[in-house]
C-alpha cells in the first residue's frame, strides 16, 4: 500500500509528540531531583515544623496584652504608650522608602532605554548597562546597607542609598523589558521625519510605556516601605531600629504595637496604589 501525505504528516506528528513527551518527562525528573536536593540542603524537617508552630503562637500571643472592655481606653493607651515617637520613626521610614524609590526609579528608567535591545543602543552599551543593573539588584539590599553603614555611619542615609541602588537594578530590568515590547511603528515614523534618538524616546516610547512605568513604581514603593522597615534592624534608621530593640529586649507588646502601625501603613499605601493604578488604566473601581 502506498503512503499518502496524510500518513507522512501523522508519522511526523507522532515523532514530535514522543520527543516532546520525553523532554517533558526528563524536565519533570530534573525538577523533582532539584526539589529533593533543596529540601536536603534546607534541612526541611516536617516534625520539627509541626512541633515548632506552637512556639510561634506563643510569640504572637505575647505581642497582644490583655485588653478589657471596661478599661479599653486605658489599656490601649498603655499598649501604644510610645505612639508619638513611633509615628515619627515611621514617618522617617516612609521618607526613606519614598526617596530611595524615586531616585532608583528615575535612574533605572533612564538606563532602561540604553538596556533595551530594540532602541538603537550599541550592543556593547546594552551589555554593560545590563551588567551594571544586574550587580545593583543581585546584591541584597541589606548587604548594600551594611556597606553604606560602614562608609557613612548609622542613620537613614545608608538605608536610602541601599534602597535606591537596589531599586535602580530591579526597575531598570523591568522597564527595559517593557521597552522591548513596544510598537516600533511610531519610532520608525519619527526617524523617517528626521527626529533624533531623544525624539524617538520622548515621542515614540514614553507614551507607550508610561502607564507600565507608573504601575511598577507604585508597586516598588509598597515593597520598599517594608524593606525600609527591615533596614532599621542593621542600624539604618526608621521604625525598624525601634522594632529590633523591642524584640531583642523581649518587649513583645511594644513589638506588637509597632507591627500594627506598620501593617496599617502598608495597607493604606496598598489601597492608594491600587486606586492610582485603576485610574491610570481608566478602570472604575466598581468594575475592578
Image (cartoon, rainbow, N blue to C red):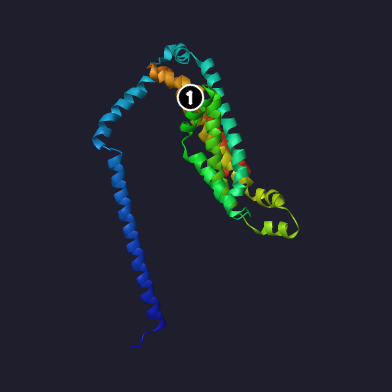
> In this view, which residue lies farthest toward the right?
193
Q: Is residue 46 visible?
A: yes
- Against 71, residue 119 (above or below) is below
Q: Position of residue 188 (x, y in %)?
A: 68, 59
Q: Position of residue 281 (x, y in %)?
A: 61, 45
Which quadrant: the C terminus?
Answer: top right
Q: Position of 121 compared to 13: left or right?
A: right
Q: Residue 20 sits in which quadrant?
A: bottom left
Depth check, front residue: 9 or 151? 151
Q: Residues within 10 Å of mark 1 (few under 14, many from 20)?
A: many
Identify the residue at horizontal 54%, vertical 37% (top origin): 167
Depth check, front residue: 82 or 225? 225
Identify the residue at horizontal 69%, vertical 52% (top origin): 197
Q: Position of 249 compared to 83: left or right?
A: left
Q: Position of 249 compared to 261: left or right?
A: left
Identify the residue at horizontal 52%, vertical 32% (top origin): 162
Q: Position of residue 24 (x, y in %)?
A: 35, 60
- Against 105, residue 185 (above or below) is below
Q: Position of residue 8 (x, y in %)?
A: 38, 79
Q: Which residue is mark 1?
A: 232
Depth check, front residue: 249 or 59? 249
Identify the residue at horizontal 35%, vertical 88% (top origin): 2
Depth check, front residue: 14 or 113? 113
Q: Is residue 177 visible?
A: no
Amino acid at each position: 500500500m502506498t503512503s499518502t501525505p496524510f500518513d507522512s504528516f501523522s508519522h511526523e506528528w507522532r515523532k514530535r509528540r514522543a520527543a516532546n513527551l520525553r523532554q517533558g518527562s526528563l524536565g519533570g525528573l530534573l525538577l523533582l531531583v532539584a526539589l529533593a536536593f533543596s529540601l536536603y540542603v534546607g534541612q526541611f524537617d516536617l516534625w520539627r515544623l509541626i512541633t515548632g508552630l506552637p512556639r510561634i503562637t506563643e510569640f504572637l500571643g505575647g505581642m497582644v496584652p490583655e485588653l478589657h472592655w471596661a478599661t479599653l481606653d486605658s489599656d490601649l493607651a498603655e499598649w501604644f504608650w510610645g505612639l508619638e515617637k513611633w509615628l515619627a520613626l515611621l514617618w522617617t521610614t516612609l521618607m526613606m522608602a519614598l526617596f530611595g524609590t524615586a531616585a532608583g526609579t528615575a535612574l533605572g528608567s533612564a538606563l532602561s532605554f540604553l538596556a533595551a535591545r530594540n532602541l538603537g543602543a550599541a550592543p556593547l552599551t546594552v551589555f554593560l548597562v545590563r551588567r551594571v543593573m544586574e550587580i545593583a539588584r543581585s546584591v541584597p539590599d541589606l548587604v548594600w546597607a551594611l556597606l553604606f553603614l560602614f562608609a557613612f555611619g548609622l542613620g537613614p542615609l545608608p538605608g536610602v542609598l541601599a534602597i535606591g541602588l537596589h531599586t535602580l537594578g530591579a526597575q531598570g530590568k523591568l522597564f527595559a523589558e517593557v521597552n522591548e515590547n513596544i510598537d516600533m511603528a511610531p519610532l520608525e515614523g519619527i526617524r523617517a521625519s528626521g527626529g533624533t534618538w531623544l525624539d524617538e524616546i520622548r515621542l515614540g516610547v514614553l507614551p507607550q510605556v508610561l502607564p507600565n512605568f507608573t504601575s511598577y513604581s507604585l508597586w516598588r514603593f509598597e515593597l520598599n516601605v517594608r524593606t525600609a522597615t527591615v533596614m532599621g534592624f542593621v542600624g539604618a534608621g526608621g521604625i525598624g531600629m525601634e522594632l529590633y530593640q523591642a524584640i531583642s529586649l523581649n518587649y513583645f507588646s511594644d513589638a506588637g504595637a509597632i507591627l500594627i502601625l506598620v501593617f496599617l501603613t502598608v495597607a493604606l499605601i496598598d489601597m492608594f496604589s491600587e486606586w492610582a493604578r485603576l485610574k491610570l488604566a481608566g478602570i472604575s473601581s466598581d468594575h475592578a
